[in-house]
Amino acid sequence: MTTQAGQDILTAEESSLSSFAGPYVTEMLGRGQALASMPYQAYMGPLTAGQSGLQQQAFQGLGALQTPTTPQTTYDPMSFTGAGTVEQYMSPYLQGALQPQYDAAQRQADIAQQNLQSQYGKAGAYGGSRQGVAEAELQRGLLDRMAGITGTGYQTAFEQAQKQFNEEQRRQMDAAGQAQRYGLDVLREQQAGGGTQRAIEQQGIAADIAQFEQERDFPKSNALFMQSLLQGLPLETQSYSYYEPTGLASLSGGIEGMTSILDILSDVGSAGTGPTGGYSQATQSAALQGQYDYYVAMGQNPTQAMASAKADLGIG
């Protein structure tokens, strides 16, 4: 905006701390600066719990475990009908089961023969042909009975031997499987224990890194803390407009109080009527303009400023 005298009206804004918050903010900033200036206080205690006593014992036990050897984990299947295998498993049964049956059959045959001889002796035909035939028949019956015992015994012995063989093979296979599972369990438990140890170690490393970063960023944190104290302060904004003063108005504005431009002109010294008597029209106009600019700069509107300037110069 430009006045008739060719002067521009300027607008400016000024922000200042609200008066009601001044003492509190000043005290707060002082305390904040004191806190930010304090040196870093490091925590000197342990950052992690570490391994417990029970964990250490468990780790020591896991470290002492040994995986099974190859022979312990290997199952070598055998053939029941292989050379010597059948006899190996049948012989103990035959020796323990058939011989008592043979002895029992022989005793029964001996008793029958005695009874036969007694009968022929009483009949007066002892040693005769009929006795010989009867004893031969008795002997044949004994042989048949022993043959039956042998056949049944061998069949039973074979079945029992095969059953025993299969049972032992199963046990060997189970033992090998258990040894293998035990080996895998050892490795699995050692791996799990190692994972727990690694987690504990990693926790300690992470705590050390966090402590290092905290110490490293301490100055930065203090700067951010100081910056945060300046945020959200209660401010007041004032806007005002003024005319750009002329050189003469600037001169008059620099004099303390309400000094009139006539006081400056009076230093030159000249007689005349009235405050402006003796001065040329150009000088009076310049003086009037200077006073007018001064009062506008002081906040008066144009009408008030003109009236005040004329009053100072004594112009009706």
Image (spheres, rainbow, N blue to C red):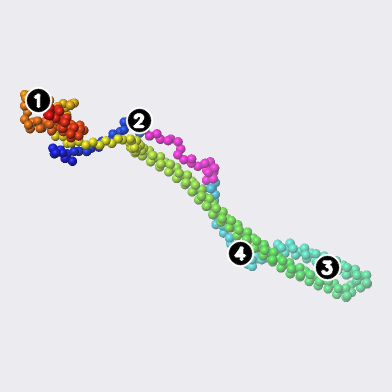
Closer to the eye: label 3 or 1: 1
Q: Quadrant of residue 138?
A: bottom right
Query: In the shown orientation, is residue 271 left or right of residue 231?
Result: left
Q: How many marks?
A: 4
Could you tell me which secondary element the residue under label 3 belongs to? helix
Residue 56 counted in the magenta span: yes
Question: Callout 2: 10 Å neighbours few (<14), some, many (20+)?
Answer: few
* Marking on residue 78: 4
Magenta stretch? 38-59
Q: Quadrant of residue 79?
A: bottom right
Which residue lies under the disc numbered 1? 274
Could you tell me which secondary element the residue under label 1 belongs to? loop
* Marking on residue 303: none
Residue 42 counted in the magenta span: yes
Which residue lies under the disc numbered 3? 109
Disc 4 residue type? Met
Tell me which label, 1 or 2, sits earlier in the chain.
2
- Gap in Å between the C-alphas at discs 4 and 3? 43 Å
Quadrant where the N terminus lies? top left
- Gap in Å between the C-alphas at discs 2 and 4? 97 Å
Q: Quadrant of residue 222?
A: top left
* Marking on residue 24: 2
Query: In the shown orientation, is residue 65 left or right of residue 135?
Result: left
Q: In percent of the image, x 77 and y 63: which residue is there?
A: 100
- Depth check: 207 or 12 in front? 12
